[in-house]
Amino acid sequence: MYMHEVTYDLNELFRMNYHIHTTLSRCGRKEMTLDAIIKEAERAGLTEIAITDHIHPGETAKVFRNDKLLRNELEHIPHTVKVYLGAELSAYGKNKYTLQYSDFDRLEYRLYSHNHYQMDGWELPDEQTPLSYKQHMKLCLEKIIKSGKADCMAHPFLDNYAVREFEDRYPLTVGCVTSVWTDNELGDMLSLGKEYQCAWEINTNAIRANPEFAKRYFHIGKEAGVCFNIGTDAHTLNNVDTFASYKIIKEILGV
């Protein structure tokens, strides 16, 4: 389900931040309380935010606990910004993902990561080469998108976690996997998301980490008519404000 109308106006997109972690994520700083996040979002002039705490392989029960805690908390926080209570779920292998029950439908935003290869329990390709990682990502993306369970893909195609897995054996750097995706392959995958109404994240961290690929990804997606969501992957209050990176992202994407 798309959260907003399809647009490529960054000024409009940057008024929304659909990737924010609270203290319920192990990586979230102590300052990342729901109340503090909402106050910072409103200070920054955002209109919509999504709370997306990690649900890694084997952590299914956390979804229900987190959802209940956040809903109870939100009821007592005055706010004008629209708050979606969701999760960053895991597509951690071919046809393996942390959303198997109808109860998950109560999540207002289902953000999926498919490339946290550094995490315990994450399936790895048979060979640790750029081409093998690309093929593995491709299969994982196809499965989760066609399941209809994903509202958006988090930091899609990002390969820095994959690089960490074999950097001691191969002279590879960030971009080694994204570089083996052809324009046609990217277009087909992005179009698949469009077919199943799964949005694609413009992750501000990923864009800056791999600017060459980011520009290609954005313009192929725009040509295909896909829906993009902005996400800062915020673990600190400073990162809640999307506009803090607006200028550099606009320059990288060439718009």
Image (tube, rainbow, N blue to C red):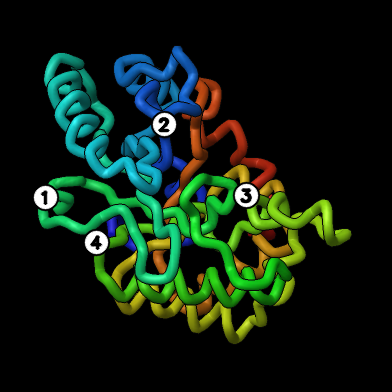
Of the numbered discs 2 and 3, the one sitting upstream in the chain is: 2
Q: Nearer the viewer, mark 1 or mark 2?
A: 1
Reply above or below: 31 against 229.
Answer: above
The answer to the question of whether label 4 and label 1 lie on touching residues, with beta carbons closer than 8 A, is no
Badge 1 marks a residue whose secondary structure is helix
Question: In the image, what residue type sits under mark 2?
Answer: His
Badge 2 marks a residue whose secondary structure is loop
**Residue under circle 2?**
21
Q: Nearer the viewer, mark 1 or mark 3?
A: 1
Q: Nearer the viewer, mark 4 or mark 1?
A: 1
**Residue under circle 3?**
206
Quote the CA–CA distance across marks 1 and 2: 21 Å
* Residue at the image position 43 percent from the left and 48 percent from the top: 12
Question: In the image, what residue type sits under mark 3?
Answer: Ala
Quote the CA–CA distance across marks 1 and 3: 31 Å
Q: Please state the horizontal and vertical placement of residue 207, each as a whole percent of the image.
A: 64, 51
* Residue at the image position 49 percent from the left and 83 percent from the top: 188
Nearer to me, 20 or 41: 20
**Residue under circle 1?**
103
- Callout 3: few (<14), some (14-19), or many (20+) C-alpha neighbours within 10 Å? many
Badge 3 marks a residue whose secondary structure is helix
* Residue at the image position 21 percent from the left and 46 percent from the top: 108
